Amino acid sequence: MNKPLPRETRLEAASADDAPWVISPPRPADMAALAALTFPSYRPLLPCCLTGEVPNGLMVLALVARAGDTPVGLVMAQWQQHIDVAGDGSPSHIAAQLISVCVAPAWRRSGIAVRLMRAMEDEVCKRGGMYLTTSYTTRMPAWRAFEQLLATCHWATPTPSLLMSQGRVADVLASPTLAQAHEAPPGFELFDWSQRRADEVARLQLDVENGAIPGTLSPFADVEEIEPNISVGLRHQGEVVAWMIVTRSPLMQNALCYRSLYVRPQLRAAYALGPLVLAHALHRHNASPVKAERPVGVFGMSVEMSTKMINFFRKRLSPYCFSTYESRTSVKRLNN
Ligand SMILES: CC(C)(COP(=O)(O)OP(=O)(O)OC[C@H]1O[C@@H](n2cnc3c(N)ncnc32)[C@H](O)[C@@H]1OP(=O)(O)O)[C@@H](O)C(=O)NCCC(=O)NCCS
């Protein structure tokens, strides 16, 4: 699984005899042209496609569609670690994530993306991968074309995983529900995330490991980016029962990411604890020196949250934001 692609092997000729392009692995001379065929955040991974090396140990695969010597399309995938793509509780499936597919504008609508996707599926399959997954947002201009591409390639119908909004924190605090940071109800105690106790961390880690807290809402994800004095926790009867974890977005230099909002299921709906921890984090963000550099909040609400919380997000938060979109995922089982 860790061998890079052979450098000059032609993987696939175009299907039509007169098709003026072929698909092959990237070459060192392609690097500048390939940068224009992927998102800025994935450009640093391009040199790794030549060597098979990556800093986090997850290998990146890339395939290039080229017309003569000119790259006109690029697909990239990265191996994933321990992911339950089948949804059966087994984390042992070997899967790769499709992270980018792009065709140069002049070459679109001629079947290149379909051929790139199929070539990548074959490559992942050949290396023992059982699934390809992908995750994207409807903020991406080409999301409709991308979903059509997934359908043509027989991927599962995409499912929304997050509702996303972006807003300036000062504007979001104009929402009447969030304008005031209310006190915690009797018996509950709000605390700065920096004040979490070691025994609480141990209990939460256990709950993440045994699945009681979904991994996507874990307060330990992206831990090195957490803002511990803006993130908020809530205790009840000696237990951490809710949190709003806020991180420095690595993708948006002007934003803090409201990364994980979670309320223990048994306490949902009764006390509006979600809005409470969110409002407290927003007020801390608004009063923090960090706001000068990062005035924007990126908000994500898992579609698994309660209907009440989803309605809150749509009615009380999104209208005060300048952009709202969905994060969606899809998966394809490969034939091996
Ligand atoms: C998405 C993208 C890769 C498609 O590339 P492409 O080479 O034009 O796609 P193909 O010609 O192989 O077409 C694949 C399917 O998508 C459809 N399609 C392509 N562009 C489309 C568009 N703009 N609107 C609707 N459908 C579109 C094609 O009709 C075809 O469907 P069909 O099999 O039912 O006829 C290309 O638009 C692109 O590079 N966009 C910018 C980068 C991007 O956002 N990538 C996606 C996320 S990483």
Image (cartoon, rainbow, N blue to C red):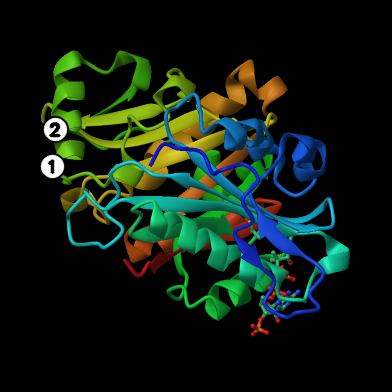
Ligand 1 quadrant in view: bottom right
Rendered image: mark on residue 206: 2
Does residue 165 appear to the left or right of 332 in the view shown? Answer: right
Q: Quadrant of the N terminus?
A: top left
Residue 227 versus residue 275 in the image, above or below: above
Give the percent coordinates (x, y) of residue 81: 33, 41
Residue 260 horizontal/vertical position (percent)? 40, 40
Instruction: Name the one closer to the observer, 319 or 55.
Output: 55
Above or below, comparing residue 198 to residue 44 in the picture: above
Q: CA distance from mark 2 to mark 1?
A: 6 Å
Q: Amino acid at mark 1?
A: Asn
Say if residue 141 shows up in the picture. no
Question: Is 98 placed above or below 35 here?
Answer: below
Please state the total of marks drawn on the protein image. Answer: 2
Given residues 74 and 126, the one toward you in this image is 126
Q: Which residue is mark 1?
A: 210
Tell me whether circle 2 and circle 1 mark residues in contact (CB < 8 Å): yes
Residue occupying image coordinates x 65% and y 24%: 291
Q: What residue is shown at x 37% (from left), y 33% (from top)?
A: 221
Most foreground residue, 251 or 44: 44
The answer to whether 10 appears left or right of 32 in the picture is left
Q: Amino acid at mark 2?
A: Leu
Question: Which disc number belongs to residue 266?
Answer: none
Vertically, is 295 above or below 228?
A: below
Q: Position of residue 222 (x, y in %)?
A: 43, 29
Element assignment for label 2: helix
Cβ at disc 1 under 8 Å from ligand 1: no
